[in-house]
């Protein structure tokens, strides 16, 4: 990007799911600011197009691939958008998702399946769809004597590492994504792919923020789902964080970016907690 002096990701193509809002949006903006071309995805077209417009306005390159990561044909569409638009695929960030909480006795099969689908099955499908292309590109690079590292960053959560009341579905999915991360780090080492995960603590996004005295909700494909941590509880949680506050989406994006730096080319199969010391 012309306005930026740092171009650590110049020439790289990244795909970032759920990058219309929150943490994913900041990851997409950061990548683009560092010179990467970005495929922006979101379930909702408007925020996806907004992220693309903001990247372009700052002099970067981006394209939208709108749709749910849980759609049968999505993974191929996502991967092919990167290959067809930008001619490459170097960074994959599995970030899209939401919460649909209940204590276990109230949790329906639908609730369980929806959360496992978005946080676990969708990343699995995206990575499976990417494999033939990554293998092909890695073989060609090896034949030319080039060493190119690619990066996968999967998004987990403190709930996945430690559990959280009301989140049997979400914590199970976020624990399982760690297993997927560690397995792919082993399977894809031979392609020079670093596969890592970031587990977030408390980050201020629409998933955690609730209006004072009110209840927040999000619309996921016509389902109105309650989200947001009650402000008193949020303040209490923040007091328990060594840095004394929730993180910003920009700070959250920084942890993903760290894994994507060339300086991290020998770091793989790791889970980093981005939680202000919590
Ligand atoms: N905010 C936190 O404190 C926190 C903590 C731990 C983990 N996380 C994880 O971080 C990731 C990002 O969350 P966030 O806090 O930025 O939330 P957010 O709601 O601000 O952003 C998530 C984006 O993903 C999109 N999305 C949801 N379902 C999708 C689907 N099926 N297909 C495509 N896009 C979809 C949403 O439309 C939204 O724009 C999620 O995986 C979340 O579980 C967040």
Image (spheres, grey):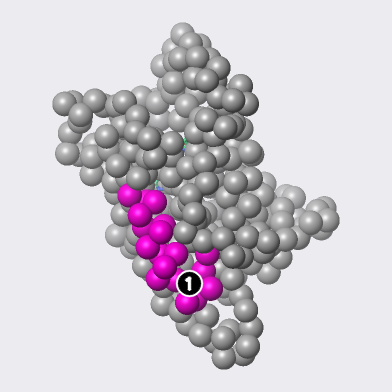
Q: Nearer the viewer, residue 47 or 76?
A: 76
**Residue at x 43%, y 39% (from the top left corner):** 157
Q: Nearer the viewer, residue 47 or 229?
A: 229
- Above or below, 250 against 195 in this view is above
Label 1 Cα crowd, 10 Å radius (few <14 / some 14-19 / many 20+): some
* Main secondary structure found in the magenta portion: helix
**Residue at x 53%, y 15% (from the top left corner):** 235
Residue 199 coordinates in the image, percent (x, y): 48, 42
Residue occupied by mark 1 = 189
**Residue at x 61%, y 21% (from the top left corner):** 244
Highlighted magenta segment, given as a residue range = 176-194
Q: Nearer the viewer, residue 45 or 38?
A: 38
- Above or below, 268 against 199 in this view is below
Q: Magenta stretch: residue 183 in it?
A: yes
- Above or below, 111 against 116 in this view is above
**Residue at x 63%, y 52% (from the top left corner):** 258
85 relative position to 109: left or right: right
Dividing the image into four quarters, tell me where ligand 1 lies. Answer: top left
164 relative position to 200: left or right: left
Farthest bottom residue in view? 143
Q: Magenta stretch: residue 101 in it?
A: no
- Figure quadrant of the N terminus: bottom right
Residue 260 coordinates in the image, percent (x, y): 61, 58
Instruction: Answer whether residue 30 is visible to the viewer in this image.
Output: yes
Q: Secondary structure at mark 1?
A: helix
């Amino acid at each position: 990007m012309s306005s930026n002096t740092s171009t650590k990701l110049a020439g790289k193509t990244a795909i970032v799911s759920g990058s219309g809002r929150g943490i994913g949006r900041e990851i997409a903006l950061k990548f683009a600011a560092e010179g990467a071309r970005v495929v922006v995805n979101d379930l909702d077209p408007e925020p996806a197009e907004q992220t693309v417009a903001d990247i372009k306005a700052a002099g970067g390159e981006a394209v939208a691939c709108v749709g749910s990561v849980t759609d049968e044909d999505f993974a191929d569409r996502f991967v092919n958008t990167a290959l067809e638009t930008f001619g490459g695929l170097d960074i994959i960030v599995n970030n899209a998702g939401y919460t649909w909480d209940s204590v276990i006795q109230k949790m329906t099969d639908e609730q369980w399946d929806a959360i496992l689908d978005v946080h676990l099955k969708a990343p699995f499908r995206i990575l499976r769809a990417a494999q033939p292309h990554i293998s092909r590109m890695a073989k060609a690079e090896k034949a030319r004597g080039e060493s190119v590292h690619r990066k996968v960053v999967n998004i987990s959560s403190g709930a996945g590492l430690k559990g959280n009341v009301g989140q049997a579905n979400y914590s199970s999915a976020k624990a399982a994504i760690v297993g997927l991360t560690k397995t792919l780090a082993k399977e894809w080492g031979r392609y020079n792919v670093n596969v890592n995960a970031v587990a977030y603590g408390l980050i201020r996004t629409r998933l955690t923020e609730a209006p004072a005295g009110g209840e927040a909700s999000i619309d996921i494909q016509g389902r109105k789902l309650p989200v947001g941590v009650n402000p008193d509880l949020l303040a209490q949680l923040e007091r328990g964080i060594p840095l004394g506050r929730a993180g910003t989406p920009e700070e959250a994006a920084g942890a993903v970016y760290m894994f994507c730096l060339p300086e991290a080319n020998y770091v793989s199969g790791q889970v980093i907690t981005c939680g202000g010391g919590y």
